[in-house]
C-alpha cells in the first residue's frame, strides 16, 4: 500500500490562504485518484475535493467550490489542495486518501489508503 503524508497545515486568519500537499512514498501516484477529506471537531469526516487518477475532472464539495483547487502532479508524486478565502468553518484536520484508478469520488469507502492528517485552523 502507498504511504501518504500531508503537509502545509497551520493557523491562518479568515480570508487567508493555505496550500496543503499530499505526498506518496513507496509507490507512484500515477494510478491513483486522490481525495481530500476533513474532520472538524465534533463532526463526521467529510469530503472536500477529489481528482481522478489522470489528474483531471476535479470534484468539490459545495462548501468549498470556488475557493479550493485540487491539482495532481504525477512527476512530483504530489497532490495539492490550494485553499483560498478560508473561513473559520474550514477549521479541521485534513486528510488525503487514494483510490486506485478512481475518479476522485466523494465516498470514503472508495479509498483504501489514508494519511495521518494535517491540522488547519482558521481564526475569525
Image (cartoon, rainbow, N blue to C red):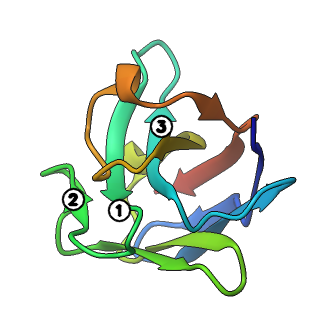
Cα separation, mark 2 vs mark 3, equals 15 Å
Above or below, comparing residue 77 to residue 105 in the picture: below
| Residue 94 lies in quadrant | top right
Residue 51 image label: 1
- Residue at the spot of label 2: 59
Disc with the residue nearer the chain's start (2 vs 1): 1
SS under mark 3? strand
Above or below, comparing residue 107 to residue 76 in the picture: above
Find residue 73 and report its horizontal and vertical position in percent: 57, 82
Find residue 5 and report its horizontal and vertical position in percent: 79, 51
Cα separation, mark 1 vs mark 3, equals 16 Å
SS under mark 1? strand
| Residue 87 lies in quadrant | bottom left
Tell me what residue is drawn at x 26 percent, y 42 percent. Answer: 105
In-front residue for pair 87/18 = 18
Q: Are marks 2 and 1 in contact (CB under 8 Å)?
A: yes
Q: Quadrant of the N terminus?
A: top right
The residue most toward the left is 62
Tell me what residue is drawn at x 55 percent, y 41 percent. Answer: 97
Query: Of tags 2 and 3, which is closer to the observer?
Result: 2
Pointer 1 local density, CA inside 10 Å: few below 14, some 14–19, many at least 20: many
Disc with the residue nearer the chain's start (2 vs 3): 3
SS under mark 2? strand
- Residue at the spot of label 3: 38
Find residue 70 and report its horizontal and vertical position in percent: 40, 71
Amino acid at each position: 500500500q502507498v504511504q501518504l503524508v500531508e503537509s502545509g497545515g497551520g493557523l491562518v486568519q479568515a480570508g487567508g490562504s493555505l496550500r496543503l500537499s499530499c505526498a506518496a512514498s513507496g509507490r507512484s501516484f500515477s494510478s491513483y485518484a486522490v481525495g481530500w477529506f476533513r474532520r472538524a471537531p465534533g463532526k463526521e469526516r467529510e469530503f472536500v475535493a477529489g481528482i481522478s487518477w489522470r489528474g483531471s475532472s476535479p470534484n468539490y464539495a459545495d462548501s468549498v467550490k470556488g475557493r479550493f483547487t485540487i491539482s495532481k502532479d504525477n512527476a512530483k508524486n504530489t497532490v495539492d489542495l490550494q485553499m483560498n478565502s478560508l473561513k473559520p468553518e474550514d477549521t479541521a484536520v485534513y486528510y488525503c486518501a487514494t483510490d486506485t484508478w478512481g475518479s476522485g469520488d466523494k465516498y470514503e469507502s472508495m479509498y483504501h489508503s489514508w494519511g495521518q492528517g494535517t491540522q488547519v485552523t482558521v481564526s475569525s
